[in-house]
């Protein structure tokens, strides 16, 4: 940090805001937030909840909009089926995603954490709201926690945890719908657990995990568990936008005395409201910290105080260290521009791969150890084995034909039905006229047809020899 921050006591860096000197947890009781940014977060939360609870039920031409079925290794993204064989698509997609995360963090810090991360949204905008409704605001919560187990405390705790459990159940069932689909979840909850014990155990485990996270772990997920939060120390720089305290304007701090004017003091009156509303127990005035999730609660609290003492808002605001030091507007750094170029290239490669992705993937090989066979009408034949993978969401009837010879399937009709997401193996002969064979190995193409449409072409070789 800059030398302009010499006023800060560096001791705060020795521990996180939710742990005391003895290593014991300091429970967070944030004051109920309100204000301009909080209202915007309410809108963002409404959009998030609408998307989260509706996406599993949205279909595109009968296929899920999004389903990550890791159990059967079937992945639907925007209605398109992806299988483990689409490893190149997944690899480029993951690289693109991580570059995007890197770029976003380098430029905008942890805005994602405060505004769109499911952990923060559910904790601060759902579970915390219920807690305010049942237990009261900051002081009431602290008083209730320290009080003996009276009838009132038993009632409030029972009511709160019952509501928390209900919401955890709803979240768990929705999360499971992203994995196996809403139809399978409906089967789980309408049939005996013994009919699908693994699915039932999964639902119970999800419910327990969510309940434990939102009742006990809480902000510790963001502070100590989430790997994205740990990346902040590597990716955030002097040009990164963060929720930041304007120390140039605010220092030195001092209590405001009625009717007194002190030109030697900054705008910060040390009311500590910015610390009281913080869900991770930090003091934003100590600079950028690991625990800060950019929730903006401190901005709203400080702006309200500034209005009351008739001073400009923005003592705590979105900005960068450089913008505070130089008193210049926030700007994108060269590093961010470089990441942007790489990101655009990766997106272009991903689009190119997806545009050329076939609905069917086939492998055609000559059967090992088999030589060519003599056939009537001056022909030779080779025996082939083909594996056909259907990567579409529908069952396909596949016809195989050769561009140069006659192709005949062994032991079945001249077509093969391949269900969605499954692989079929077929054996067939290709017969070539001897006049076509000029060398020991002749290159051929096998076309896979669905109706009149050619959906894939596979190259192979024909082994044969004729005297010149």
Image: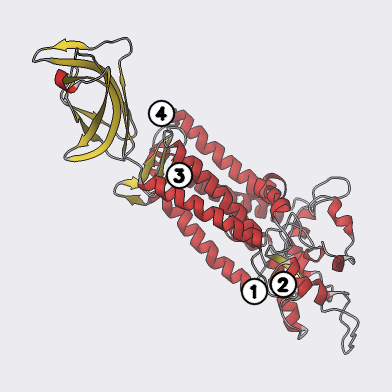
Q: Are marks 2 and 1 in contact (CB under 8 Å)?
A: yes
Residue underneath mark 4: 195
Secondary element under disc 4, as helix, strand or loop, is helix
Secondary element under disc 1, as helix, strand or loop, is loop
Q: Residue 141, located in which quarter of the rendered image?
A: bottom right
Where's residue 342, x and y in %?
55, 53
State the CA–CA distance, disc 2 to disc 1: 7 Å
State the CA–CA distance, disc 3 to disc 1: 34 Å
Tell which tag, 1 or 4, sits nearer the viewer: 1
Where's residue 69, x and y in %?
44, 38
- The mark that comes first in sequence, 3 or 4, is 3
State the CA–CA distance, disc 1 to disc 4: 51 Å
| 10 Å crowding of disc 3: few (<14), some (14-19), many (20+) | many
Where's residue 48, x and y in %?
51, 59
User: Could you say which disc has been placed on residue 178 in the image?
Assistant: 3
Q: Is residue 299 above or below residue 395?
A: below
Q: Is residue 202 above or below residue 224?
A: above
Query: On the rendered image, what quadrant is the C terminus found in?
Result: top left
In this rendered view, identify the residue nearer to me: 39 or 7.
Answer: 7
365 relative position to 301: left or right: left
- The mark that comes first in sequence, 4 or 2, is 4
Residue underneath mark 1: 35
State the CA–CA distance, disc 2 to disc 3: 38 Å
């Amino acid at each position: 940090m800059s030398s302009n921050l010499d006023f800060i006591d560096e001791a705060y860096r020795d521990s996180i805001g939710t742990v005391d000197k003895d290593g014991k947890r300091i429970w967070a009781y944030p004051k109920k937030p309100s204000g301009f940014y909080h209202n915007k977060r309410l809108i963002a939360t409404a959009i998030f909840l609408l998307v989260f609870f509706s996406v599993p039920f949205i279909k595109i031409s009968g296929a899920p909009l999004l389903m990550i079925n890791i159990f059967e290794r079937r992945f639907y993204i925007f209605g398109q089926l992806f299988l483990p064989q689409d490893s190149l698509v997944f690899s480029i997609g993951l690289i693109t995603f991580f570059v995007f995360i890197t770029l976003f963090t380098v430029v905008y810090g942890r805005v994602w954490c405060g505004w769109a991360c499911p952990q923060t949204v559910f904790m601060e905008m759902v579970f915390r709201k219920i807690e305010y409704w049942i237990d009261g605001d900051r002081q009431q919560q602290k008083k209730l926690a320290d009080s003996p187990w009276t009838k009132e405390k038993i009632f409030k705790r029972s009511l709160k945890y019952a509501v928390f459990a209900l919401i955890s159940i709803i979240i768990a069932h929705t999360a499971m719908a992203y994995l196996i689909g809403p139809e399978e979840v409906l089967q789980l909850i309408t049939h005996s657990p013994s009919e699908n014990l693994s699915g039932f155990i999964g639902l119970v485990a999800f419910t327990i995990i969510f309940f434990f996270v939102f009742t006990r772990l809480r902000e510790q997920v963001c502070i100590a568990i989430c790997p994205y939060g740990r990346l902040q120390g590597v990716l955030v720089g002097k040009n990164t936008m963060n929720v930041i305290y304007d120390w140039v304007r605010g220092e030195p701090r001092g209590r405001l005395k009625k009717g007194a004017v002190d030109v030697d003091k900054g705008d910060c009156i040390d009311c500590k409201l910015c610390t009281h509303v913080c869900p991770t127990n930090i003091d934003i005035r100590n600079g950028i910290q690991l625990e800060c999730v950019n929730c903006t609660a401190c901005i709203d609290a400080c702006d309200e105080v500034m209005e009351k003492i008739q001073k400009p808002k923005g003592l705590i605001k979105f900005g960068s260290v450089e913008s505070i030091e130089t008193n210049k507007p926030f700007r994108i750094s060269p590093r961010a521009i470089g990441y942007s170029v790489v990101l655009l290239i990766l997106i272009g490669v991903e689009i190119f791969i997806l545009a050329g992705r076939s609905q069917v993937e086939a492998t055609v090989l000559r059967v090992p150890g088999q030589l060519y066979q003599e056939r009537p009408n001056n022909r030779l034949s080779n025996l082939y084995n083909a594996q056909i993978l259907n990567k579409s969401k529908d069952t396909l009837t596949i016809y195989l034909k050769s561009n140069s010879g006659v192709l005949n399937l062994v032991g079945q009709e001249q077509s093969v039905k391949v269900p969605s997401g499954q692989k079929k193996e077929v054996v067939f002969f290709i017969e070539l006229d001897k006049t076509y064979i000029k060398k020991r190995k002749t290159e051929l193409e096998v076309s896979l047809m669905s109706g009149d449409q050619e959906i894939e072409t596979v190259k192979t070789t024909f082994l044969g020899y004729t005297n010149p």
